[in-house]
Amino acid sequence: MNSNWRHLLIRHAILLITVALVLGFITGAYGWSMALALAGYLAWILRDLMRLRSWLEKADLEADVPEAKGVWEELFDQVYHLQRRSRQSRDRLQAIIDRAQESTTALRDAVIMVDNSGNLEWWNPAAESLLGLKEPQDVGQPIANLLRHPRFKDYFESGNHAVPLEIASPVNDRVRIQFTITRYGNDEHLMLVRDVTRVHQLEQMRKDFVANVSHELRTPLTVITGYLETLLDNSEGANPRWRRAMEQMQQQATRMQSLLNDLLLLARLEATDYPSDNHPVPMLRVLSSIKTDAQALSAERAHHIVLEADANLSIKGSETELRSAFSNLVFNAVKYTPEKGEIRIRCWRDENGAYLSVQDNGPGIDAKHLPRLTERFYRVDSSRASKTGGTGLGLAIVKHVLLRHKGRLDIESTLLRGSVFTCHFPPSQIVED
Ligand code: ADP
């Protein structure tokens, strides 16, 4: 209680007692006079209380402050200022919301707010044209009921939104849309949806171009290598300088052939999202045959190759694709590990999924290269790669194959110590007996 109030209350008490005493002096009934004065004071307080109540009840709160005296005057004033402050901050907030809504309305990208139960809360007009959402009937509906694309459902429920999702628009399948989801507040989602049709078409043109060029180059290259083989077979007695030149031509032509094969494989992998096959692939069988091929590749370099694999483990997917990814890892280990090196292939499972790791004690890779290693044509050291005849596409193929099998590639490496390449598959990719 501040001193102002205290003084007012003391003044009221003195006034009340004085009135009661005067009345008592006139009438001689001091008790009744006191009671009458108190009743009057109570009536006065109740009247102002009723005024306060009816003023507060006014919905617009804009009505004038009621007339009052003493304590009540101050009370009304304080309530009035409190209301004015809260009205001002409400107006300020409303202005911010209005401006945010105006700007999102002008956006060509869709902005959608989804609550923590996955229900639609708010969206801008672009969401109606890109996704076909309708107001007001879709407000409060689960987003998964309105956007029924299986990949969207998986993406939304996975909780991992680090990489944007690209699918065809549910309104027009010639339009490609890209989703970016950000979590905020109490597990609510803010979704941004962009029309990426043009970028997608350009990307498609690039893929088609690479695939077509690789395909067209295959036939002339087959003819060249065929003739070179025949010429080399019949080159006894030829000038040794010519023979060397022809051998080098054949070596480079073979390299070009594997480059074209890898480019075509990558183009095929990129053409669809999920593997064409979804069969059980027994890991032990596939890895045993890769180990045999690796031993043949190693030949007189005599690597010590060890295979430890869970005999009952099978992964769902395409055997051809998985074989090509695993053999790229194992053959890289053979290519880059010096002779008599150790190569260990392990395959196991735990509650987080299935794993395949290829470990070698080769030259290792500097940590600065690791993030870019799966990019096409990225090479740590071009001399190392040209000696081994690598195409620079092996790890890009591995990454793509794993993506198509919902897996990922982890690379650990220490310079001069060796490298471990580990493929991780989620439990949903394991075939249960
Ligand atoms: P490449 O056809 O050149 O082998 P990859 O995409 O398979 O292309 O590999 C990219 C680069 O990663 C290689 O050029 C090589 O420098 C490095 N690399 C891959 N595997 C290993 C390994 N086991 N040990 C050391 N370096 C490796």
Image (cartoon, rainbow, N blue to C red):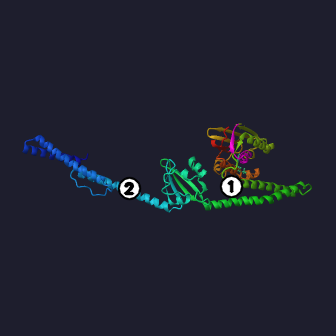
Is label 2 in contact with label 1 (beta carbons under 8 Å)? no
Q: Is residue 423 visible?
A: yes
Q: In the image, is residue 27 above or below residue 201?
A: above
Q: Secondary structure at mark 2?
A: helix
Please state, as top left, top right, bottom left or bottom right, where the N terminus lies in the image: top left
The answer to whether 73 appears left or right of 223 in the picture is left
Residue bearing mark 1 = 271
Q: Is residue 380 visible?
A: no
Residue bearing mark 2 = 90
Q: Main secondary structure of the magenta part?
A: helix
> x and y percent of residue 379 in the render?
70, 52
Report the front residue among 17 and 308: 17
Report the front residue among 125 and 133: 133
The question of residue 410 being in magenta is answered with no
Q: Earlier in the sequence, mark 2 or mark 1?
A: 2
Q: Label 2 sits on what residue type?
A: Arg
For the residues marked 2 and 1, what is the alpha-carbon distance in whole angstroms? Answer: 53 Å
Work out which residue is located at the far front of the displayed protein and give it. 137
> x and y percent of residue 324 in the render?
73, 48
Q: How many marks?
A: 2
User: At x 41% / y 57%, what residue is drawn?
Assistant: 94
> x and y percent of residue 340 in the render?
77, 41
- Give, as a single range, the part of the protein colored magenta: 312-331
Report the front residue among 347 and 80: 80
**Which quarter of the figure has residue 289?**
top right
Circle 2 packing at 10 Å, graded few (<14), some (14-19), many (20+), is: few
Report the front residue among 170 and 396: 170
**Which quarter of the figure has residue 433?**
top right
